[in-house]
């Protein structure tokens, strides 16, 4: 089974979603509480000027001297990635009290009435069924999504030169949909299962800083224009080995059993207008958090089985 990339969105031929985490990583801890309490207590006031959030990196602001530029508030620590899983260290001068990285995932399916309904990730899907993933992070950072088919070579399906101007920057607790319900065409709003059975694996990589030597934004757009047949971009062996090692870093997981409920207006509005979720808003179905506070990345995999 192969993923097909449409003109303005990635159409995935995919199926049931199974979290690829070992039982010993599911330690007793209030993972959900730790994730949700980092949300603001109340949603910000509604604004008529709210727009679809940009996925580009924050703009830089000149210092008083004009000699340097500093980014607008984003990641809370200066970190460097280690080649060994779970051994990423915060560099000297990093702010104290950096929170552990967390990622929330919710899987939706399209019901006969066209509504987005929460579905158990272990549900088995078949030809013609549709799914969408809603993601939420507990810190500002960068999201990468890679795909392998039957353990084949990896391909980067997000960021994508045709989506969000090649950007992949997420703000804390501002939900992100893949694909987007805001797409103008119905066929571009969902991942649709085709007739071919197979096993896909999606790798979600959430980092505080951009991955080195991975093109994003204008670099990705330029690359794809110059190498049309080479797009989507594919990671080299060294980077892929490093990400595989990072995936072995221990994560703590909390999985909800509340399925069958429709996506709320608050979730949809927050996604399309870039408004953060509050502690009172709906929770992700699956929450993963890094065990260590000093890590610069959170890497997890989801298996998609098409029957």
Image (cartoon, rainbow, N blue to C red):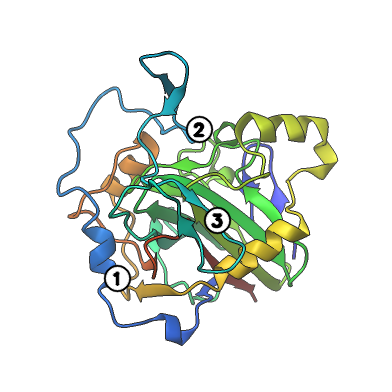
User: What number is the disc on residue 56?
Assistant: 2
| Quadrant assignment for the N terminus | bottom right
In primary-sequence order, the first of circles 3 and 2 is 2
Q: Is residue 201 left or right of residue 39?
A: right
Q: Residue at x 68, y 37 (%)?
A: 7
Q: Nearer the viewer, residue 162 or 301?
A: 301
Q: Is residue 40 visible?
A: yes
Q: Nearer the viewer, residue 272 or 287?
A: 287
Residue at disc 2, secondary structure: loop
Outermost residue toward the bottom in this view = 24
Quadrant of the image occupied by residue 49 = top left
Q: Is residue 253 left or right of residue 28?
A: right
Q: Which residue position is annotated with label 3?
A: 81
Give the CA distance from mark 3 to mark 2: 22 Å
Vertical arrangement, residue 214 with respect to residue 303, above or below: above
Q: Which residue position is annotated with label 1?
A: 31
Q: Is residue 128 visible?
A: no
Vertical arrangement, residue 224 with respect to residue 199, above or below: above
């Amino acid at each position: 089974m192969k993923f097909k990339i449409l003109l303005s969105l990635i159409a995935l031929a995919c199926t049931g979603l199974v979290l690829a985490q070992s039982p010993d990583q599911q330690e007793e801890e209030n993972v959900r509480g730790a994730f949700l309490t980092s949300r603001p207590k109340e949603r910000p006031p509604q604004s008529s000027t709210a727009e679809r959030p940009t996925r580009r990196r924050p703009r830089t602001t000149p210092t008083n001297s004009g000699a340097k530029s500093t980014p607008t508030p984003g990641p809370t620590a200066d970190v460097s990635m280690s080649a060994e899983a779970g051994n990423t260290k915060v560099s000297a001068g990093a702010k104290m009290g950096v929170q552990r990285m967390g990622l929330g995932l919710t899987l939706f399916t399209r019901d006969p009435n066209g509504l987005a309904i929460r579905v158990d990730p272990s549900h088995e899907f078949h030809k013609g069924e549709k799914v969408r993933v809603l993601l939420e992070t507990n810190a500002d950072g960068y999201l990468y999504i890679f795909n392998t088919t039957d353990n084949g070579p990896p391909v980067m399906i997000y960021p994508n030169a045709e989506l969000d101007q090649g950007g992949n920057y997420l703000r804390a607790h501002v939900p992100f949909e893949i694909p987007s319900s805001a797409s103008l065409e119905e066929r571009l709003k969902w991942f649709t299962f085709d007739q071919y059975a197979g096993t896909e694996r999606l790798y979600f990589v959430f980092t505080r800083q951009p991955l080195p030597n991975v093109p994003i934004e204008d670099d990705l757009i330029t690359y794809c224009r110059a190498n049309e047949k080479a797009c989507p971009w594919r990671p080299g062996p060294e980077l892929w080995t490093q990400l595989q090692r990072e995936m072995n870093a221990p994560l703590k997981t909390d999985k909800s059993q509340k399925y069958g409920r429709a996506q709320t207006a608050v979730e949809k509005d927050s996604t399309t207008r870039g408004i953060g979720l509050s502690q009172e808003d709906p929770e992700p179905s699956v929450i993963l958090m890094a065990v260590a506070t000093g890590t610069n990345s959170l890497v997890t995999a989801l298996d998609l089985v098409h029957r």
